[in-house]
Image: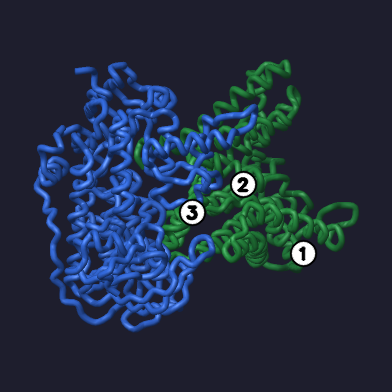
Chain colours: A blue, B green
Amino acid sequence: MSAPAIQMVAIDKRFGAVAANRGAGLTVAAGEIHALMGENGAGKSTLVKILAGLQPPDSGQFWVDGRDVTGWNTAQALAAGVAMVHQHFMLVPTLTVAENVVLGREPLRGPRLDRGAAVRAVEELCQSTGLQVDAHRLVADLSVGEAQRVEILKVLYRGAKVLLLDEPTAVLSPPEVAELWRVLRRLQASGATIVLISHKLDEVMEISQRVTVMRQGQTVQVLDTAQTTAAALARAMVGRDVDLAVQTAESQVGEPLLQVRGLQVAGHRGPAAIVGVDLDVHTGEILGIAGVEGNGQSELLEALAGLRPYRGSIRLAGRDLAPLSVQQRTAAGLAHVPEDRHLRALVLDFSVADNLILGKTAQFTRRGFLDRRAVADHARQLIADFDIRPPDPQAPVRGLSGGNQQKVVIARELSRNFQVLLAAQPTRGVDVGAIEFIHDRLRQARAQGKGVLLVSSELREILTLSDRIAVLYRGRIVAVVPREEASESVLGLHMTGVVPAEAHD
Amino acid sequence: MTRTAWIETLFPPVVALLVALVAGDVLILAYGQNPAAVWHLLVDGTWGNFYGIGQVLYKATTLCFTGLAVALALRAGMFNVGAEGQLAAGGFGAGVVGLLLPAGTPWILAFGLMFVAAALCGGAVAAVPGVLKARFGAHEVIATIMMNFIVLALVNYAVAAHLHTPETLHTQSIASGMVPRLAEIAPAFHGSAANLVLLLALLAAGVVAVVLFATRFGFELRAVGLQVAAAENAGIGVGRTWIRTMVLAGGLAGLGGLNFVLGYKGFYEDGFAGGAGFLGIAVALVGRNHPIGVVISALCFATLSQGGLAIHALVPKQMVEVLQALVILAVAMAVPEVRARVAQLGLTAVARRGQP
């Protein structure tokens, strides 16, 4: 057998006190689709960034096509055909697709950009790979899925033969995911090697030939996908058995608690993002909002939370929320887990204890002064209740793993005296163990007779938790489906605007 | 604070001072002088005798107030470039109130009124950019710069047209409420301008530290400064916090005017601020926006300022200004916050346009 396309051995990488990789390894054969799995903070991204030349390892060695390339930089990696497709898109929105793809390696006619050649090159690439995107369109006008295709085109244009994809499906709808799988298989057929970071078991089972599982910075197992099961992978990731079954809702749905009528909300850039939404969340109910991202979810939640002006009425237990500020809404019984953890939910440079009192400072204040002891006690209590690690109230939140950061947010919001919880992407970027934990807490809130409005781009999550599911498409609720009648395929069709014949309305 | 946090805090200013020292050597050599001799002269003329020490303390007092004004605003995420105007307004307010008081006013009453006038005038000047930012989203850098022009022009006009003593650019002397000089307590300081407003500056630094780190207002202020969206989400009135912070910052800068008006001259004089407001930006940056850091860094900058006069015999005193500028540049490059903010600006600009 020839040398593996990628071989990484005994990679160590520390960031300050945190060991991201501790003797991690990765071996990928030429032409395979290889999944790299692990909980958040397991060191997957770090390992792949080292491979792509974004960071040098502290120690260890790695080879590409049998050549020792330890500690190379991105330019050298790119020259050898190894490139990373970024999770956060790095595109220039005011340029066209073709211009973005050729950026940095433009075909020139004299001193000027040869637009025709750029467009031809992009169209040829689209042809050969099956990636569908119009080379003439502005990147600003693209959907998230299309933007991702441009990112892939970019690295292919640079001649990449080894593609490293970091959680590529996090922002995609089910049809877009299926489309991505088709493209990846086609790239594989034409000889490309693909490393795919994921923590979604079903994805890994579907697309990969082999799986490397990481835990706490170490490589714990390498498995042939065909000879393993989702349950075995979950066990390898978490180090114990995990209950993955979809639990049916057993709830005592009662009175309407949150009532939204004729809601209209302006979008970020002028056009309305929410155009006439009616919905009810009852006591003891989890109402799931399914939809591809960017169909008005953010605006809906921000309007409810009081962060964005709106027209129409929002009532909480009969009380009109319109005149209430964010703070007053919280006092009236709203809790909010914002979708953007790093931007809205947490002050990253504050400690765990300080983040846990955001939005409830009043109860820790005596004559204008913060009661530091009460703040610390409160933090210790929640750290214990929600198993936040490390259990140090003074640790800066920035240093916590994604799952633990999210636990801080969940702990803060659930420890309020609330009636309705707005939970947006409550488990995004969170590891399997923490997902289970957060889901349990949401079910607990329901069992206590609270109402939960759950917005998630993960259909599986919506299906697992919700009693009813509303589908948001282009700012409208296009369907409300009871849990028993919902399935991924039915919701998927509503989500993409293709209403099936047996549509529920 | 952990060890790494200390290193991260102290690293930039120390590096900046070293860079300035090396650059200073090069400049002195280029001028054909012996660096050792010049540095010796600088230290001798500042910390080498009581007069020098007094002058350093006097200059550091004003810089401490303006440094605190910049640092406090920066903690709330606002770049207050207007300390110069706020300082002038504070001094003017104190000077004018002093003129209005009759000669027999009890000291405590006179001082109290002038103290309040200085704080109110500085605060009022700073309130304008605060309100403009909170209500209309006007960038505070532009607004504070413009307020500098407006305030300095208005105050100059008021003094030149109505309030000046003939043949001078200053107002009449204040009858009551003067702050004693240091020399009245320790005669060794004789001749220097150092005065007990110095204690007020230290007290102000202490109060700022308590407000920032022990009160709910300070907590909310820092949350707003670190992450506006998260603060908004937590129900903190962001606009309200900006306005209050600016008023406090302006009040601090305004109090700096007492150092000249009550501690030194006994009247308001045009141009007394003399760049101390702008230098406050450097003081805050080098002091890492921490009240204790601001006090130390105010002493450093005051030493350089006073040292410039001392070394005039060997090299032009402008050399010190070059050094101060180098310190600022070095800190600006070494301060991670500054780097992060610059990177953030670039990224958010792209991300904002990138949203579908």
- For marks 1 and 2, the one nearer the N-term is 2
Quadrant (top left/top right/bottom left/bottom right) for the N terminus of chain A: top left
Which residue is labeled 3 in the image?
B225
Question: What secondary structure is found at the residue carrying circle 1?
Answer: helix
Chain name for mark 3:
B
Residue A67 is situated, as x and y percent measured from the top left of the image, at 31, 16
Between residues A361 and A180, which one lies in front from this camera angle?
A: A180
Specify whether residue B258 is in view: no
Residue ID at (68%, 20%): B28
Asked if residue A116 is positioned above or below residue A320 in the image, the reply reads: above
Q: Amino acid at mark 3?
A: Gly
Which residue is labeled 2 in the image?
B61
Specify whether residue A150 is in view: yes
Q: CA distance from mark 1 to mark 2?
A: 24 Å
Residue ID at (39%, 70%): A476
Residue B271 is situated, as x and y percent measured from the top left of the image, at 77, 49
Q: Amino acid at mark 1?
A: Leu
Residue B152 is situated, as x and y percent measured from the top left of the image, at 76, 55
